Amino acid sequence: MTLAEASYPEDLKYHPEHDWARIDGGEATLGVTWYAQDSLGEVVFFEGPEIGTELSQDQPYAEVESVKAVSDVVAPLSGEVIAVNETLADAPEAINADPYETGWLVKIRLSDPSEADSLMDSAAYAASLE
Amino acid sequence: MVPFAGWEMPVQYDGIKVEHIAVRTHAGIFDVSHMGQIEVEGPGSLAFLQRLVTNDVAKIQVGGAQYSLLLNEDAGVIDDLFVYRLGHDRYLVIANAGNHETDLAQFGLIARDFDVYVRDATDNYAMLAIQGPNARRIVEGTLHLELPPRMKVAARQVGRRPAIVCGTGYTGEDGVEILLDPEIVPAIWTELVDAGVVPCGLGARDTLRLEVCFHLHGNDLTLDTDPISAGLGWACDESTGYVGSDRVAALRAEGTDQRLAPFLIEGDGIPRQGNPVMLDDERVGEVSSGTFSPSLEQGIGMAYVRTDLAEPGTELEIDVRGKRRTARVSSKPLYKKAR
């Protein structure tokens, strides 16, 4: 099952490599966008980082793999991983079904909150896809 | 849609997994009109095909079908194909789209020595494959057709136009492949889909064939591979004197350094074409095809490995993007249908 219609929630910040960040004070939840999961097809495998890993903005930190291809997931922001979505090990299809809620990938403690200024809002990201 | 050998091809409709499972449990339809069709006619047809392809074409009765290979003199694999015998001196060869021009060149080269007429018929035919345990029943009921048995071919009418129906496929399931007038394809496709057949793309075609260890030319067969290493010695009969038969005879007698081995990944990881196969720190082979198996829900593939490591049960490691994954060599097919 996948979300049939493209959606880009307005409360998120977007990276051009098709990742989103939900910023909450000094922390952020990260994931991939509707466009990313739709391009990839049914996700069958998620390989996340260990808790404690330092992510650097614009650098790959995880892999999502569908039947047809594997793709790097790029960090939209820098920070230390404080949680990994463990449910994806058994149910990676949540990335397709619900990419912004149950399909989140990791939570990080931001090392440089000002990096958020370089990300796009929903309208700018959606426009970038056209 | 993706470009493939000059054709616009759908990789998937609703998703590779659902399409794959539909073919394993019900019925799916693939538009494989990109496949190349070459007609061979004339009194020298049999002698020509015996020289051209590896299998013993004399074994094909009128209305029969046979898998075969097209080799160069060094036993490199130019293509793999099916030969259908439509009449006493009339054959139809169905081969891969990506090799169509080189196939035609080889046909033309060999045909010079025989009393035979070779014609590229690719533009005359569209080709639909309807595959799965319910495929025959639905095709018979919907198109009001009497279908030939497995590995047989018959001339029929589809949509009041002449068609050729083949009891063959590339999925490991029962089903048919129908060659028909391209003009009526949209109508026939719609009729079958309305009858419950699930549209399937190239992605599912690849996962289905790999689960049952059917070779894909360009991956598992290339000019740098040979039939013996590929495990296709059964499709070669050197007594017919085909192009490359001397080399194949030598390889059969001496053995080959490498062998194509099907394998299952134990645990996580999805192998991909080009991944190195490792035994401790030594590189002992390379993955020729790899994917995630929707039926088995694990990584599967085929790899050319050192011959002594190709026995079922052998444990190997595959370097998947820098991570070592455990693989176990398996017997064919990787997916065994519950009986």
Image (cartoon, coloured by chain):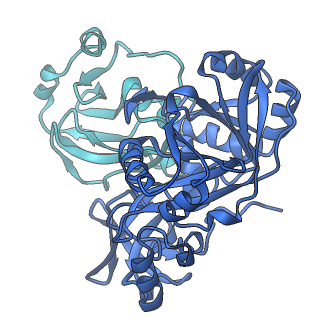
Quarter in which the N terminus of chain B is drawn: top left
From the viewer's perspective, tell me whether residue B338 is left or right of residue B39: right
Going 24% across and 30% down the picture, which residue do you hit? A17
Palette colour of chain A = cyan
Vertical comparison of A2 with A129: above or below: below
Residue A95 x %, y %: 47, 36
Going 70% across and 65% down the picture, which residue do you hit? B59
Vertical comparison of B327 with B219: above or below: below
Going 52% across and 66% down the picture, which residue do you hit? B54
Quarter in which the C terminus of chain B is drawn: bottom right
State the residue in front, B30 or A15.
B30
Residue B75 x %, y %: 39, 70
Going 51% across and 76% down the picture, which residue do you hit? B329
Q: Is residue B131 visible?
A: no
Image quadrant assignment for residue B256: bottom left
Residue A14 x %, y %: 26, 22
Palette colour of chain B = blue
